[in-house]
Image (tube, rainbow, N blue to C red):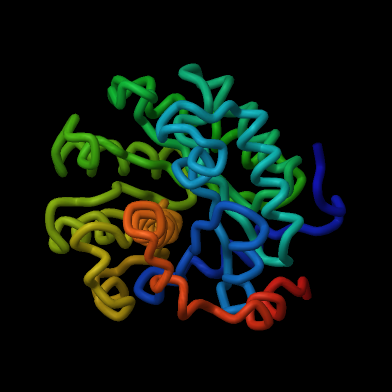
């Protein structure tokens, strides 16, 4: 299911963006239109979002997207622009290490520059046992290194986000993921910025931070000061879009009020951004 010329390798350009202390913004998009808009506005790389993708299909978040659907969706975003695209691939779409390895190979065939794999089993949000979590990343990393092109593997320790473990366990897992061959480390939503700094200082590998919740109030310069190498937004942009739909829909359907749509982005402006370079 290759969506790119096999001679084109988005990996090196994508890898080069990961600079600890000088983070780039990985803009998580959900369709070709949002991808082209962000590219036109200066995004350096794009990411899929499992929650945003689920919303486009009228589904709930967590565990409702199948691997073939995620791959086809990702390939459509790869085709939308010339930017590197990273896949938000939840738990790698399976519990066992071999499935994670196969997901890496299929993601590369789809033209992705990399993917992230979590240590959490959807939809229950239970964390994998430590040893299995590490074996899963080790298998995924081995598959990535066996590819004929570059590929950035992000290992996620999601236990702080889900409430399954604390910062000490997250640091233990991230260290093991680092040693297992992950290229980038990610523990979403640590309790404090100081915890995020500790995560960044725990490895020479770049660390991804999620700009959500209280972290959405931090400017890029503060993420840089903390040592972050990459900032993603997850489903935040999609949820913001749905907030506008919700507000406009409530006004229109509850009160017959169309005023929320009186000022909107001109169609001509959007048309210009839809032009693929």
> Could you tell whether 81 is left or right of 116 in the image?
right
Residue that appears at 38% across and 50% down: 185
| Closer to us: 194 or 188 | 188
Residue that appears at 50% across and 57% down: 28
* Quadrant into which the N terminus falls: top right
Residue that protrudes farthest toward the front in the picture: 256
* Quadrant into which the C terminus falls: bottom right
| Closer to us: 33 or 194 | 33
Taking the image as drawn, is residue 130 in sight? no
Taking the image as drawn, is residue 263 in sight? yes
Q: Position of residue 49 (x, y in %)?
A: 49, 48
Q: Position of residue 3 (x, y in %)?
A: 80, 47
Q: In the rendered view, would you say 236 is above or below 132?
A: below
Residue that appears at 62% across and 31% down: 103
Tally the numbered discs: 0
Q: In the rendered view, would you say 255 is above or below 133?
A: below
Q: Position of residue 205 (x, y in %)?
A: 40, 57
Residue that protrudes farthest toward the top in the picture: 96
> Could you tell whether 97 is left or right of 245 in the image?
right
Q: In the rendered view, would you say 234 is above or below 231?
A: above
| Closer to us: 248 or 46 | 248
Q: Position of residue 56 (x, y in %)?
A: 55, 43
Instruction: Examine the image and state in which quarter residue 100 appears.
Output: top right
Residue that appears at 62% across and 72% down: 39
């Amino acid at each position: 299911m290759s969506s790119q010329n096999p001679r084109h390798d988005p990996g090196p350009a994508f890898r080069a963006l990961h600079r600890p202390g000088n983070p780039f913004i990985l803009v998580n998009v959900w369709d070709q239109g949002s991808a082209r808009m962000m590219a036109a506005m200066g995004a350096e790389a794009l990411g899929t979002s499992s929650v945003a993708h689920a919303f486009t299909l009228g589904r709930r978040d967590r565990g409702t997207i199948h691997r073939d659907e995620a791959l086809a969706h990702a390939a459509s975003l790869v085709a939308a622009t010339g930017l590197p695209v990273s896949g938000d691939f939840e738990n790698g779409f399976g519990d066992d290490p071999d499935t994670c390895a196969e997901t890496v190979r299929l993601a590369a065939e789809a033209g992705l520059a990399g993917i992230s794999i979590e240590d959490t089993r959807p939809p229950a949000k239970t964390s994998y046992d430590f040893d299995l979590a590490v074996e899963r990343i080790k298998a995924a990393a081995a598959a990535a290194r066996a590819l004929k092109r570059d590929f950035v593997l992000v290992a996620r320790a999601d236990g702080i986000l889900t409430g399954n473990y604390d910062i000490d366990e997250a640091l233990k897992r991230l260290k093991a993921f680092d040693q297992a061959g992950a290229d980038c480390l990610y523990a979403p939503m640590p309790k404090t910025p100081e915890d995020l700094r500790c995560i960044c200082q725990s490895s020479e590998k770049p660390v991804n931070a999620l700009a959500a919740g209280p972290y959405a109030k931090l400017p890029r310069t503060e993420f840089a000061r903390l040592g972050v190498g990459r900032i993603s937004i997850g489903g935040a942009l999609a949820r913001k879009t749905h907030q506008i739909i919700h507000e406009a829909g409530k006004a229109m359907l509850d009160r017959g009020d169309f005023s929320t749509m009186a000022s909107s982005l001109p169609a001509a402006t959007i048309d210009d951004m839809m032009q693929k370079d």
